[in-house]
Image (cartoon, rainbow, N blue to C red):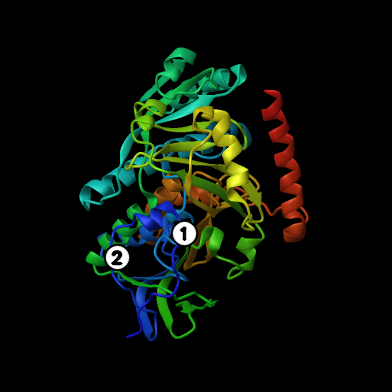
Amino acid sequence: MKTSAFTPHASSYYAATTNSQPARPVLAEHLDVDVCIIGAGYTGLSAGLHLTEAGFKVVIVEAARVGWGASGRNGGQIVNSYSRDLDVIEARYGADTAGALGAMAFEGGRIIRERIARYSIDCVLKNGGVFAAITPGHFTHLQKQKALWERYGHTQLQLLDANATRQIVASDRYHGALLDMSAGHLHPLNLALGEAAAFESLGGRIFEDTPAIRVERRFRPIVHTPQGSVTANFVIVAGNAYLGNLVPELAAKSMPCGSQIVVTEPLGALADKLLPQDYCIEDCNYLLDYYRLTEDKRLLFGGGVVYGARDPAHIEAIIIPKLLKTFPQLANIKIDYAWTGNFLLTLSRLPQMGRLDHNIYYSQGCSGHGVTFTHLAGKLLAEVLQGQATRFDAFAKLPHLPFPGGRLLQVPFTAIGAWYYDLRDRLGL
């Protein structure tokens, strides 16, 4: 049996502090199962775990390794709702759609916590997340966001003025903040590995270094890989930003974008002065910064967007100025890790779920809210395969629009739009 040991994880802090994981095989046979899932990130793992719990025979094929993409590289923050909030959804699509999506907007974080508790996943979960207002206008927005979320039943929220915010984060940048105690942070790669172990403990099988190279659409679809294939009753496409051109109609409606992260050397006692409550933080800019402490008292700081997902040559040059603008007291700090990872952007900034055929389903395009939404998506995919389509269809009915100008122009058009919003951020509008 050929085992997977050939595609390493990105050279990140997470990879350097990962829990042990078993050697997983490359698919070199022809299998027949209930469900074949393409992609062993959070969406695929969440769907696979829900389905195996329901008694389905499930195989996951992964082009690299479990959690190799965004699931193992992100900022590790549990952030509620969607990249476009419920007021925008209501204005665009009506009260009924907003009500349906609003009822699920805070479910992803609950699913994560339930998985961690049920399967004893060691991923350093910490509760509490903060939206930080850089301008007075941001703080006004947070006041409205609190009222909006409470209207949809979310009550674990507290508005903080500038003085109270400084007790949470040692920076003079912020006019106030919104604290969400149902948010939090964790080690994302270890969460993925723990979910994979739970899936395998229930009889699920994962094949690494096994890219799907073709999906044969037929009464029982076949997923072809370089050395094998999987025939299934259902296929779930869960490659997200790393799907490539396997399904061209999905690629036309989404765009991979890169985000960059650096991690400092251990800060010791200084870490507790920077973030005394150990909450995670993200600011309210359109091109936002996000940061938190790691278990060993380093500062993990991320931000920046590279449209089209090319890897920037100088990650530190992008992120360090942002870090020092927030924490000038770290001017001489050493950076031990720097990496980039891709998330998938949609034109609407809302996730896309749907059917490619009566037995081929997909979920993609979390647009920056992937940690929580992917866990909800996995549950919805498991529901629809069991004949419960109502919640899945609430997302499937949303318009999945292609980028103007097709794939050739999606990067420049999106970058122009981002430049406009970045200018607004800089002017404090």
User: Which residue is denoted by mark 2 in the rendering?
Assistant: 21
The answer to whether residue 131 is left or right of residue 156 is right
Q: Nearer the viewer, residue 261 or 222?
A: 261
Above-or-below relation of 402 to 286: below
Q: Residue furthest front?
A: 332
Above-or-below relation of 161 to 84: above
Q: Residue 38: horizontal and vertical position, in percent?
A: 46, 68
The answer to whether any part of residue 387 appears in the image is no
The part of the image, by quadrant, that contains residue 175 is top right
Label 2 sits on a secondary structure element that is loop
Residue drawn at point x = 26 percent, y = 48 percent: 116
Badge nearest the viewer, 2 or 1 = 1
Residue drawn at point x = 35 percent, y = 76 percent: 33
Question: Can you say which quadrant of the picture contains the C terminus?
Answer: top right
Above-or-below relation of 379 to 268: below
* Pointer 2 or 1: first along the chain: 1
Q: Dot 1: within a 10 Å radius of its alpha carbon, few (fewer than 14), some, or many (20 or more) residues? A: few
Q: CA distance from mark 2 to mark 1?
A: 17 Å
The answer to whether any part of residue 119 appears in the image is yes
User: Which residue is denoted by mark 1 in the rendering?
Assistant: 11
Q: Residue 133: horizontal and vertical position, in percent?
A: 54, 23
Q: Residue 357: horizontal and vertical position, in percent?
A: 53, 67
The answer to whether residue 419 is left or right of residue 65 is right
Residue drawn at point x = 36 percent, y = 84 percent: 2
Q: Nearer the viewer, residue 153 or 144?
A: 144
